[in-house]
Image (cartoon, helix red, strand yellow):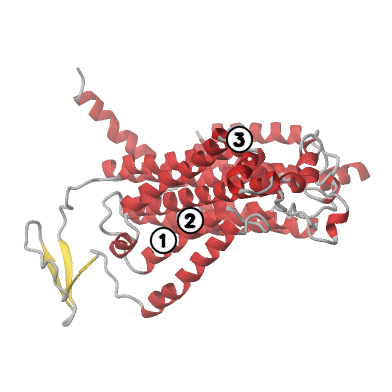
Amino acid sequence: MEALWEQILTKANYWMTIALMMVGLYAMITKRNLVKKIIGMNILQTAVILMFISIGAKRGATIPILKHGDAAAAHAPRAVDYINPLPHVLMLTAIVVAVSTLGVALALAVKIYQQNGTLDEADILARQVPRSHEGGP
Amino acid sequence: MIWQIEFVVLVIVLICGVAAVTVRDLLGAAVLFGAYSFMMCLLWAIMGAVDVAFTEASVGAGVSTVLFVAAVFRTSRRTKD
Amino acid sequence: MKTAAALLVLLFGGLLVYASLEFPAWGDPMAPASRHVSPHYIERSLAETSVPNIVTAVLADYRGYDTMFETIVIFTAGVACLFLLRIFGRRSSESRLYRHLPTGITLRISRGGAVPLSSKEFERIDLQWVPYSVVVRTTCRLIVPFSQLFALYVIAHGHHSPGGGFQGGVILGASIILFAIANNLRASLAWFSEKLAVLLCGLGVSIYVATGALSFLLGGNFLDYGTLSKPFAMGAVAARSLGILMVEIGVGITVMAVMVHLYYGLASAGRHDEGL
C-alpha cells in the first residue's frame, strides 16, 4: 500500500500530462470544425512541452540562473543546485515554432473558409465530391 | 516546487483544456484556450522553468489568442461540435 | 467513428501510462536526463560564456545552430502566410464607407465611384465600424511605448534575467498588434507597413547568419563567437557574450516581424485593408 501511494505521488504529474495529451488527440480526431482541430493540436503540443519540463524538474534546486558577483564567485556552481536547463532551451524554441505553425494552420483555415463558406469538415468534403465528377478528363 | 499547488493548477489546466475543445462557440473556445495557456504558464513558473513560462505568457496567452480571435472574426463563430 | 477514436486514444494513453511506470520519480535529482550533458552546462557556462542565465547561454551559444534553424522555421511561417493569404492589388468588390468628420454622416461609395481623395474632412472607416472608445485609444497610446521599452529591456537583459530574443520579439510584436486593434488596420499599416514587416523578417535571419559567418571568416567555426574577440578588442569569454547579444537581436527582429505579419494577414483575410 505504501509503495502504491509512493508510485501515485511521484507519477501523478506525468499521468495528468498524459490525460492532457489524450484530450488533444481526441479533439484532433473527432472534432469536425477546423478551428477546434487546431485547438486540439495546440493542446497536444503544450502537453508534450509540459512532459519535457516535468522531466527537467529537480527537487531542492532553484531556477537555472547562476548566482554571480563577488560573494558567489568564490565557489563554482554545483549541478544539484540548479534545475536542468536543457529541456527549457529545447521547449522555449518549440513554443515559438508552435505559434508559427498555428499561424500557418489558421491561414489555411481562413483560405478554406473563403473557398467553401464553411469550416465543417463534412460539409467541405460534401462540396468537393460533385466538383471532381464535373471536372473529369 | 510544492506539489499540492502544482496539482491544483494541473487540475485547472485540464478543466480549461476540456472546456476549450467542448464549448460550442469558437470565440469562447479561443478565450478558454487563452486561459489554458495562462494556467500552463503558471504551472511552468512553479516548476522553475522561468524562461519557458515567460515565453508561454507572451506567446500562448497573448499572440495565439489574438490570432485565434482574428481567424474566428474572418470565418464563422458557430460550430456544430 | 467516435468509439474507434476513443479506443485509439485510450490505447495511446494506456501505453504512455505503462511507459511512465518506468520513469524516474518526478523531481529526482539523479534522473538520467539531469546527468548526461546538463551538469556541464550548469557548472561551466558562466566560466565559458560569462552569461549567468544558463538557458540563454545554451540557446544561443552551445546550441546556436539549432536556434538558427528555429528562426528560419519562423521566417518560413511568415513567408508561407504571405503566399497563402495575400490578395494583391485587386480592389475589394464591396462598397467602401467614408465618414464625413464635421457632420458625422457616413457615405457609402460603390464600386467605381469617386473617392474623396486627400480630403481632410473624410475618413475611411471599416464596414463593421464601431465608434471609437476614448478610453481604449488613450490607454493604448499610454501602454504601447512602455511595452516597447520593456521588450527592448527583455532582449538586452536576457543574459541576466529570464528573457531573450524570442520573448522580447513577441512583446514588441504584441505592442504593434495592440495598436492595430485599438485603432484600425490602416493606421497600423501606415505606421508599420507590410513591406517593412517582410524586410525585417529577412533582416533578422540575416543578422543571425552574418554573426555566424563573421566568426567563420575570422578563423573559427561557424557560430563560434570566441573569434569575435579580435575585431572588438575584448577577451574571448566577453566576445561570446557579445555574440549571444547579436544573435538575440536578430531573433527578436524576425519574431516581431513575423507575429505582426501573421496578424495582418489573418485579421484582414489577406486584403490588408480592413481589420479586426
Residue at 46%, 46% in the rendered image: C204
Residue at 31%, 34% in the rendered image: A126
Seen from the viewer's position, the closer of residues B69 and A97 is A97
In the rendered image, the residue lying farthest to the top is A137
**Residues beneath discs 3 and 1 located on the same chain:** yes
Residue at 65%, 49% in the rendered image: C234
Quadrant assignment, res C9? top right
Residue picked out by circle 3: C9
Residue picked out by circle 2: B63
Residue C177: image tag? 1
Image location (x, y in percent) of residue A62: 79, 55
Residue at 61%, 31% in the rendered image: C221
Q: Amino acid at mark 3?
A: Val
Task: State which quarter of the image contains the C terminus of chain C.
Answer: bottom left
Q: Are marks 1 and 2 in contact (CB under 8 Å)?
A: yes
Asked which secondary structure carries label 1, the reply is helix
